[in-house]
Structure formats: structure tokens, C-alpha cells
């Protein structure tokens, strides 16, 4: 048994993944709001969650999701709430969202254990600092990027300086409103 870690992100053309729906009060606003990913994009997001075996979150993304998803009553929310969730945080000691387990201080070592124990895809939504650490450690197996036709000029980017990873494209789909779904596999 071995899980596959997929960083699945909404991303601007200049690589920003921070606060796509404006819930974090970063000043970026709801930068995905003016666009519709369309039925094909909606189906992709639903299918990826249905296929997931677990999720990994950083604290900021976790806070946003934990405040919303337990209150939503849809099949998507039901699946989100039911999945095992792993949280990288040094400030939360007792996570309240159901099925959440704290990861240890050594994030790469903790995530290796998660990969070994989860059968299936392990999704990372947002959680830039987690992505940065796991990219540098070579632990992200795939990137699933919905690239929005907007340039933000500021914000936290998916790819930090100094991290190099070779990628192989596995999908390139044009969605509604000029959004591109780009999927890549990391190459060892």
C-alpha cells in the first residue's frame, strides 16, 4: 500500500495560489470569483475528491476549510468531512474537524508514514508552506493545477525559489473562461 500525493491548486498565471476565494483577508480578494470553470472543471474537482483516500492541510487552509465544510450539506461536503485529514500545524494542539490527525514536527518523515498507510490519492488543497516543504523533499507525486487567466502581482506562489523538480505533463485541458487544467507527474 502506498498513497500518491497530489497538490491540487487554483493558480494565477504568475504562480500565486494564496487565498483564491478571498476568505483569508490577504488583500488579494476573490480572484477566482470572476471565472467559471464550467461543467468539465466542476466534474474534475468532484471526481478528484471522490477518488481521494485522505487530505493534507497546512494550518491556514485547514482553518478556512474547517470553518465552512462541516456546515455544508452536499455530497461533496459529506465526502470532504468524511475523509481522513492530516494537519501540519505547530499552533493547533487539538483539531476539532472530524477525522483530523496532527502531523509531527518533522513534516517529511510524517508524510512518508501517511503515504505508506493510505491506499489511494492524498490531496493537498492550498497549504503553500506544506507544498513548499514536500516539493523540496521530493514527496509530491503529481501537480494538478487549474490556472486562471489573471496576474495578481503579489501573493504566495506554489514554487518557491531554490526548488527544482522535473515534470512530465499528463493532461492539458481548456476549461471555461480560459482556465487551463494542467496536470503533471513528478519525474524522479
Image: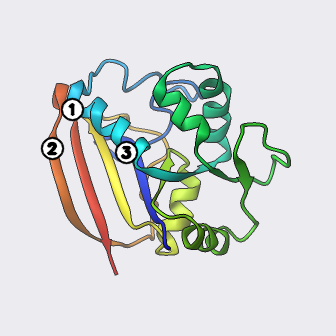
Residue 40 shows which numbered tag? 1
Q: Is residue 160 left or right of residue 93?
A: left
Residue drawn at 37 percent across, 34 percent down: 152
Residue 173 shows which numbered tag? 2
Quick check: can you spot residue 150?
no
**In the rendering, at what x and y percent does residue 144 appear?**
33, 51
How packed is label 1: few (under 14 Cα within 10 Å), some, or many (20 or more)?
A: few
The mark closer to the camera, 3 or 2, is 3
Q: Earlier in the sequence, mark 3 or mark 2?
A: 3
Q: Nearer the viewer, residue 16 or 123?
A: 123
In contact (CB < 8 Å): disc 2 and disc 1: yes
Quote the CA–CA distance across marks 3 and 2.
15 Å
Residue 48 shows which numbered tag? 3
The mark closer to the camera, 2 or 1, is 1
Q: Nearer the viewer, residue 62 or 16?
A: 62
Q: How many marks?
A: 3
- Secondary element at image label 2: strand
On screen, residue 53 above or below 175: below
Q: Is residue 80 left or right of residue 33?
A: right
Amino acid at each position: 500500500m502506498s498513497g500518491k500525493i497530489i497538490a491540487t491548486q487554483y493558480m494565477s498565471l504568475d504562480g500565486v495560489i494564496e487565498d483564491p476565494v478571498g476568505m483569508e483577508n490577504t488583500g488579494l480578494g476573490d480572484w477566482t470569483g470572476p471565472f467559471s470553470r464550467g461543467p468539465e472543471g466542476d466534474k474534475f474537482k468532484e471526481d478528484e475528491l471522490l477518488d481521494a483516500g485522505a487530505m493534507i492541510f497546512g494550518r491556514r487552509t485547514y482553518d478556512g476549510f474547517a470553518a465552512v465544510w462541516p456546515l455544508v450539506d452536499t455530497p461533496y461536503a459529506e465526502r470532504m468531512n468524511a475523509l481522513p485529514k492530516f494537519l501540519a500545524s505547530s499552533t493547533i494542539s487539538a483539531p476539532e474537524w472530524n477525522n483530523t490527525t496532527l502531523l509531527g514536527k518533522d513534516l517529511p518523515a510524517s508524510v512518508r508514514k501517511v503515504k505508506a498507510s493510505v491506499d489511494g490519492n492524498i490531496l493537498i488543497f492550498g497549504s503553500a508552506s506544506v507544498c513548499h516543504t514536500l516539493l523540496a523533499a521530493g514527496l509530491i507525486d503529481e501537480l494538478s493545477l487549474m490556472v486562471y487567466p489573471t496576474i495578481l502581482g503579489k501573493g504566495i506562489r506554489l514554487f518557491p525559489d531554490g526548488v527544482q523538480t522535473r515534470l512530465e505533463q499528463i493532461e492539458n485541458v481548456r476549461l471555461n473562461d480560459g482556465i487551463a487544467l494542467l496536470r503533471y507527474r513528478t519525474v524522479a
